[in-house]
Image (tube, helix red, strand yellow):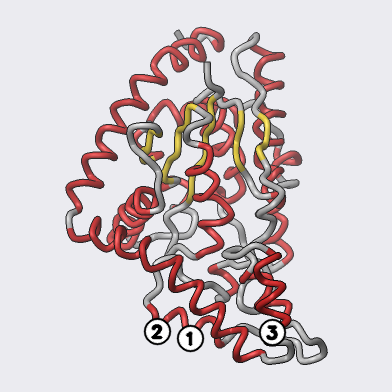
């Protein structure tokens, strides 16, 4: 029997190549090795997206992106987080009832908001418990995460252990699945690629957008190899291949950026074509999400009953 994998992406804006290499590529690579459940984290997105029309579009776009990038709905259950509805939010509440505020104050997102002197909402503060519910509801064995997101899985494990101590063995303890080779995908300024930094290369960018983004990559004139360019380039070519390219064009930053542009266009082009085709025929994506919702609801029914019996609610 295959182990269960669970993960998802928030529909908060335009996807970039960091989303692909940091998450989606892992989902695709692992879909034959695990019983995979990949979702669109629309409830999580409500912490930042308060425009209903925009959120609806973002949800569709994430689903189309999953499929365009190679996730096979016959192998993977693709679903919208909110389609689980009541059982997920009920489980989040149960976790809230056994979790202290001091524990939640350790969350990276909460601490980051405080450091930036932002007033965090209860949604942001309670974010780890909803994420724990996402993971534990599915009896996940593994959760693919970046090295900087390992805390999410640690919170889920801690919560499962606490629940099991109080109400009896109910949840598995999930493990983080970290693909070390990917690491942190750098943005055009050298920092981690992130929408919040405005340093991204869109996953389905036009050729003109690719050219503009690559030419804006910050370069360090102190060396013969522009490290920020190279760090992105090695996502698309082996280091052995790049050795020849960067030796041939040593010190020629413009030529090296042009080489990256060629490789980026070759990578993005086929994905963009599939993505645009799905945008033109939304019924394909809608049917996949409808099927995923039905499958996930059927799957969680026994778990929901077990949780309610354990806590005395049933």
- Asked if the residues shown at circle 2 and circle 1 are in contact, with their CB atoms under 8 angstroms apart, the answer is yes
Residue at 30% x, 55% y: name it: 56
Dot 2 falls on a residue whose secondary structure is helix
Residue 73 spot, x, y in % from top left: 34, 37
Residue at 59% x, 34% y: name it: 132
> Does residue 280 appear left or right of residue 71 in this picture?
left
Residue 8 numbered mark, or none: none
Using a 10 Å C-alpha cutoff, classify the residue at mark 3 as few (fewer than 14 neighbours), some (14 to 19) or many (20 or more). few
Q: Which residue is mark 3?
A: 248
Residue 86 spot, x, y in % from top left: 39, 29
- The mark lying in front, picked from 1 and 3, is 3
Q: Is residue 292 above or below residue 184?
A: above
Residue 11 spot, x, y in % from top left: 42, 55
Residue 192 spot, x, y in % from top left: 66, 66
Residue 212 numbered mark, or none: 1
Residue 208 numbered mark, or none: 2
- Work out how far the residue at label 2 is from the one at label 1, CA to CA, in angstroms: 6 Å
- Work out how far the residue at label 3 is from the one at label 2, CA to CA, in angstroms: 26 Å
- Work out how far the residue at label 1 is from the one at label 3, CA to CA, in angstroms: 24 Å
Residue at 74% x, 65% y: name it: 115
State the residue in front, 113 or 31: 31
In terms of sequence position, does the residue under pointer 3 or pointer 2 come before the other?
2
């Amino acid at each position: 029997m295959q182990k269960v994998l669970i993960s998802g992406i928030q529909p908060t804006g335009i996807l970039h190549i960091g989303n692909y290499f940091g998450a989606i590529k892992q989902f695709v690579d692992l879909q034959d090795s695990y019983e995979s459940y990949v979702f669109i984290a629309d409830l999580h997105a409500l912490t930042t997206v308060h425009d209903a029309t925009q959120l609806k579009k973002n949800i569709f776009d994430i689903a189309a992106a999953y499929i365009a990038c190679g996730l096979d709905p016959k192998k993977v259950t693709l679903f919208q987080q909110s389609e689980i509805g009541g059982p997920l939010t009920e489980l989040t509440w149960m976790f809230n009832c056994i979790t202290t505020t001091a524990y939640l104050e350790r969350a990276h997102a909460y601490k980051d908001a405080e450091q930036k002197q932002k007033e965090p909402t209860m949604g942001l503060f309670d974010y780890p418990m909803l994420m724990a519910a996402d993971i534990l509801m599915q009896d996940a064995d593994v959760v693919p995460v970046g090295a900087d997101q390992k805390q999410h899985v640690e919170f889920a494990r801690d919560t499962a252990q606490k629940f099991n101590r109080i109400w009896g063995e109910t949840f598995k303890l999930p493990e983080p699945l970290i693909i070390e080779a990917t690491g942190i995908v750098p943005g055009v300024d050298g920092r981690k690629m992130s929408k919040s930094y405005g340093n991204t290369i869109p996953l389905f960018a036009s050729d003109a957008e690719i050219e503009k983004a690559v030419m804006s990559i910050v370069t360090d004139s102190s060396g013969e190899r522009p490290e920020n360019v190279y760090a992105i380039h090695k996502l698309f070519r082996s280091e052995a291949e790049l050795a020849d390219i960067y030796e041939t064009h040593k010190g020629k930053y413009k030529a090296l950026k042009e080489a990256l542009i060629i490789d980026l266009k070759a990578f993005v082009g086929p994905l963009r074509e599939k993505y645009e085709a799905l945008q033109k025929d939304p019924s394909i994506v809608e049917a996949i999400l409808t099927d995923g919702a039905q499958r996930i609801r059927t799957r969680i029914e026994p778990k929901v009953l077990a949780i309610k019996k354990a806590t005395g609610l049933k």
